[in-house]
Image (cartoon, rainbow, N blue to C red):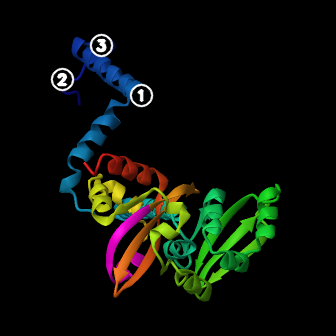
Amino acid sequence: MIYWYEPTSVAAWIKRTLSMFNLVLFSVLTVLVVSEFRFDWGEQLLGRYLASTNALRPETGIIWKTGNQADRAHSYLDTIVTERQHQARSAQEATSFSELARVVLPGQWTGLDRERFKTLYLDLPDNMAAELIPPAELVWLFGTPTLNRIFCQGKSQGLEIYFLGPDNRVIRQLDLDHQFLSNLENQETSFSGTLETIPGFAGRIFPADQFFKALLSLPMEVLPDLITTPEPLLREKGTIVRAGIWNEANSGYIRLGFEFHANNDTKIVLVRAREWAVWRLSMALSRGGQ
């Protein structure tokens, strides 16, 4: 049975196949397929649609969970890196081995610059410096190419410092236990007398009112570097009547002396200040604290 719309001959079939409509339709489809392979516009349209409707879809499925876990992992790693950088910066800015032990918590470790270690060591009293490591041995460590780097590790019982060679072999290990750190913090930072009896303060002694007026006139960010360890001053009883500035700098620090009067007794308390901050203070004192 032949339907009325079927071609009745080969010529009619070819004529219908090659009609204008079919040729246009074939050309359009060909252009779409070729452009898809060339420009990937289909994937881009699908991706934009999915991105625009992402908030409307529930956050479930393996892909979402995997992405969420990856985001959490990246956030955690960023936190670790930030904490490590902050710890390393705090360690390099430590003004004593006691402060260094408070910065590097048990189970944590950080590198320590050679110059920073030298500064901390030279600030120790002679007896405690020799107890930590004999000066001659330290001169040998720093004077030979054997030493590559220094790092410290926090322990529950204190702090350990390692001197490493080029192959990361431990050359020397220092153990700063709680007893050593306690003895270090209890070292005398005050003694009886007046500022005039100390030659290092000669010519740079000021009344307390003048000194603190100049100090408090400086920007707030300068003040923590002028009195880096306020604890000895806060523990002392009595009234500050005068303050002095040491005539020499040592490893970027300058001593400040504060003269206390209490119960007919005169006492001097020494603290350290950063050299650049003391320079700012000296300029303010020369201007009369203005």
Circles 3 and 2, Cβ within 8 Å, touching? The answer is no
Residue holding disc 3? 18
Q: Amino acid at mark 2?
A: Tyr
- Who's the residue at 53% across and 67% down the image? 198
Residue 230 visible, this orientation = no
Is residue 239 found inside the magenta-colored segment of the image? yes
Q: Position of residue 126 (x, y in %)?
A: 68, 75
Residue at 39%, 23% in the rendered image:
34
Residue 39 visible (yes or no): yes
Q: Residue at x 65, y 62 (%)?
A: 118
In terms of secondary structure, where does tag 3 sit? Answer: loop
**Horizontal and vertical percent for residue 106?**
54, 80
Q: First in sequence: mark 3 or mark 1?
A: 3
Looking at the picture, which amino acid does disc 3 mark?
Leu
Q: What's the magenta region?
A: 230-244
Mark 3 vs 2, N-terminal side: 2
Helix, strand or loop status at disc 2: loop
Q: Quadrant of residue 229?
A: bottom left
